[in-house]
């Protein structure tokens, strides 16, 4: 049973993770997984299912707001979702066979890769929104969905760290639409991932009861944070959203690599 202090700390953690997740299209796990493992000292195989559960609620809360504003590209989301299911099932199996340190190291290296891509690839600042084009790059969105699912299960991050910049930079999807598409895909992939992870790892890699109790303490804060983020997202310049995004990734990457290397 969690103490009152632990419940408050988990609630605050969820609030912060949900705010970042809703604002940047990450689902919140890019904050939540490192905090649970590095801050609370939880095994990463326990942090991942907790994070996936939180991702469901954070993403769903934000998606409903983005849907009302007409930012969702429905065919794009459908394509990514179909392939994300395959990726997340495969990623769950790989994660179940991987040691904690290897997953932490992979988490940090992946974030470094995303930061390097942001610095080296020149892109225009996108301040607008757009309707979904009639002709879609189906192979590209399929591959993106698969990678989202794979990373979501393997690292518990939802896949938004990949989906948002790839849609925006390579597939020319406006940033706010890319964030909305990413979150809508995370709703499905995180749901499938959570169920699969509990089937594969419950009782061996982690305690299902402990995971559900911690998730119950985190989710209310996550939902509130995500709701607040989507309410204020239009008031923040896209340039500053990107700055926040990559500064957070840099800090998390360093700490996850350090922990994975045993420093």
Image (tube, rainbow, N blue to C red):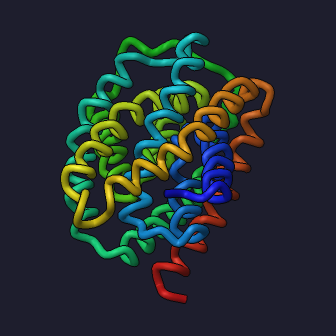
Q: Quadrant of residue 190?
A: top left
Residue in the image at 37% along x and 74% along y: 100
Q: Is residue 89 visible?
A: yes
Q: Is residue 71 above or below residue 173?
A: above
Above or below, 232 relative to 215: above
Q: 230 or 4, which lies in front?
A: 4
Q: Looking at the picture, how far across and down is residue 208, in whole percent?
A: 32, 54
In this image, 53 relative to 208: left or right?
Answer: right
- Residue displayed at 54% across by 65% down: 112
Question: Does residue 119 appear in this view?
Answer: no
Quick check: 26 left or right of 86? right
Tally the marks.
Answer: 0
Residue drawn at point x = 55 percent, y = 63 percent: 34
- Classify residue 59 as left or right of residue 246: left
Quadrant containing the C terminus is bottom right
> What is the x, y in percent for residue 26?
53, 43
Asked if residue 199 is positioned above or below residue 180 in the image, the reply reads below
Q: Quadrant of residue 193?
A: top left
Q: Residue at x 22, y 69 (%)?
A: 97
Q: Nearer the viewer, residue 81 or 263?
A: 263
Residue 68 image offset from top left, x and y in percent: 57, 10
Tell me: residue 212, above or below residue 105. above
Q: Where does residue 90 sit, x and y in percent of width and height? A: 20, 52
Residue 104 sits in quarter: bottom left
**Between residues 80 and 21, which one lies in front from this camera angle?**
21
């Amino acid at each position: 049973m969690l103490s009152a202090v632990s419940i408050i700390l988990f609630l605050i953690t969820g609030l912060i993770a949900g705010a970042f997740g809703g604002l940047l299209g990450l689902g919140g796990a890019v904050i939540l997984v490192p905090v649970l493992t590095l801050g609370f000292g939880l095994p990463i195989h326990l942090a991942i299912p907790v994070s996936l559960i939180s991702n469901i609620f954070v993403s769903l809360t934000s998606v409903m707001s983005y849907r009302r504003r007409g930012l969702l590209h429905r065919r794009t989301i459908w394509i990514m979702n179909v392939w994300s299911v395959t990726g997340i099932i495969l990623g769950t199996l790989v994660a179940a066979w991987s040691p904690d340190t290897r997953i932490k190291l992979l988490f940090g290296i992946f974030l470094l890769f995303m930061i390097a891509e942001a610095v080296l690839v020149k892109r225009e600042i996108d301040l607008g929104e757009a309707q979904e084009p009639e002709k879609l790059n189906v192979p590209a969105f399929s591959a993106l969905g698969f990678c989202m699912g794979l990373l979501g299960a393997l690292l518990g991050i939802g896949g938004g760290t990949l989906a948002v910049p790839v849609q925006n930079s390579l597939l020319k999807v406006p940033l706010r639409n890319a964030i909305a598409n990413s979150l809508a895909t995370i709703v499905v992939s995180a749901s499938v991932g959570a169920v699969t992870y509990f089937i594969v790892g419950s009782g061996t890699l982690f305690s299902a009861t402990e995971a559900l109790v911690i998730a119950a303490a985190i989710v209310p804060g996550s939902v509130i944070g995500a709701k607040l983020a989507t309410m204020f997202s239009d008031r923040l310049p896209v340039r500053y959203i990107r700055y926040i995004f990559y500064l957070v990734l840099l800090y998390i990457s360093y700490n996850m690599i350090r922990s994975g290397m045993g420093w």
